[in-house]
Amino acid sequence: MRFFIVHAHHEPQSFNGAMTRTAVETLEGLGHDVVVSDLHQMGFDPVSDRRNFTDAANADYLKQQREETHATETGGFAPDLVAEMEKLEACDALIFQCPLWWFGMPAILKGWCDRVLAAGRVYGGGKWYDDGLKRGKRAMISMTTGGPESMYSAQGLNGDIDTLLYPINHGVFRFIGFDVLPQYMVWGPARMSDDERAAALEGYRERLRTFHETTPIAYPSLSEYDTTTYTRKA
């Protein structure tokens, strides 16, 4: 399999850094191909604007989806975006590696989504959900938190982690067609002992070893929705 890891943490010595290194070592040891986009190391610009494009459909008014569709038709994406799009298109499996920041993904990773997941090339024209570009492929969040697991339960102070991550799991991964695996969470690694961190990394190795056998999250199919209102059929 061809794995693509999008890594979003500014400190190479962080636990997120250790998780990405563990993933590369484990997956390559299993014979997989692994590509990593370390967004901070790359100096990836998360701001989406006209720098996304090498020309314009309308130079007077920037409508993002129109410009993305035009760039798809004309080959007009900026080179840094083309490189990321090609990595995405080539992969069989996508992993987002990041900390949970302000109940979502870090800004640099959100900016990667804003810029790379372009209309026309990645979605649109009937390419979404069951019929998305990455149908039949797999994606997963690997994430750390600052607080303990109990804070992220349905009764926890911060709310249920599945609800917090729905915009990524369903709104990014599933939207572009991936089968979405349950997230791998490491709860508060900064508060762990060395032995506990080592156990968390071993747990991650095991998740990666069984990546292809892990049952995806069950989401409704497009056939269950009315095609006029896109609400669930009665």
Image (cartoon, rainbow, N blue to C red):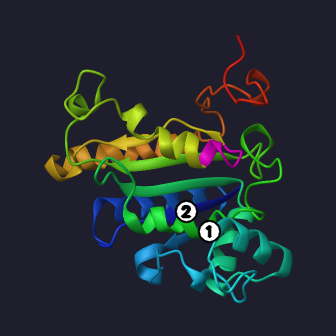
Determine the image quadrant of residue 79: bottom right
Question: Against 61, is 32 above or below?
Answer: above
* Res. 7 visible in picture: no
> Is residue 91 toward the left or the right of residue 6 in the image?
right
Name the residue type under label 2. Answer: Cys
In the current view of this chain or complex, which residue is farthest to the bottom?
54
Residue 186 on image: x %, y %: 32, 44
Disc 2 to disc 1, C-alpha distance: 5 Å
Question: Against 197, is 70 above or below?
Answer: below
In the current view of this chain or complex, which residue is farthest to the top?
234
Residue occupying the point 76% across, 83% down: 76
- The label on residue 116 is 1
32 in magenta: no
Q: Are marks 2 and 1 in contact (CB under 8 Å)?
A: yes
The residue that disc 2 covers is: 113
In magenta, the rendered stretch is 173-178
